[in-house]
Image (cartoon, grey):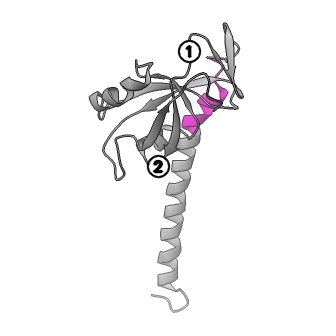
Amino acid sequence: PRADVDLYRVRHLRNRLAHIQTDHKKIMQRIEQLLPILLSTTDSYEQNEEYHQGNTAVTSEERPFASITAVKSGSPADQAGLIVGDLLVRYGDITDFNGIAPFTQRHLNEAFLVKVFRPNFPRAFTLEVRPRAWSGPGLLGCNFVPHSSADSS
């Protein structure tokens, strides 16, 4: 060993660099996952006959039936990209609020698609959700409430 090199400091800095690189990779993967959603041109709000809810316009054929009121950090819902305020239009093949819990339980550890409208966002988009046991409550880690056309989101 050389007397002019602090081995403890070198090890600490190398470890810190490894952690930063890992965090950077995770962030870049998340950006790669969400960027196509942001740039997608499908499911525009301006299709077909419309009605308006606050800042959100949706087609008459795809009315939201639930909204998300809470998303726990690190939960499967958080990892899928769901956020508070999202309006659910389709949850797998479910389009009514009462079907959410049974559908989620039947599809434990199985991925399915959730179509959402996000207030102040010009398009609907689809996210892949995988309910599973995790360190928090429930299988998804988010709360749903029924959404009606009278709500102002």
In the image as oriented, which residue stretches furthest toward the bottom? 3
Examine the residues drawn in magenta and state their main secondary structure.
helix
Considering only vertical position in the picture, is 53 above or below 9? above
- Please give the name of the residue rendered at 41% of the width and 22% of the height, measured from the top-left corner: 92
At which x and y percent is residue 6? 52, 86
Do labels 1 and 2 touch, CB within 8 Å? no
Q: Amino acid at mark 1?
A: Glu
At 35% from the left edge and 48% from the top edge, which residue is drawn? 137
Residue stretch in magenta: 32-42
Instruction: Of the two numbered discs 1 and 2 on the same chain, state the one appearing first in sequence.
Output: 1
Residue 140 rendering spot, x and y as whole percentages: 39, 40
Label 2 neighbourhood size at 10 Å, few (<14), some (14-19), many (20+)? some
Residue 62: image tag: 1
Q: Secondary structure at mark 1?
A: loop
Q: Give the residue pinned by disc 2.
A: 72
Task: Looking at the picture, tell me which residue is in the foreground, 46 or 5.
Answer: 46
The answer for how far apart the CA atoms under marks 1 and 2 are is 27 Å
Q: Amino acid at mark 2?
A: Lys
Where residue 84 appears, as percent x and y from the top left, is 56, 41
| Position above or below: 82 against 91 | below
The answer to whether 134 appears left or right of 120 in the picture is: left
> Quadrant of the rendered structure where residue 121 is?
top right
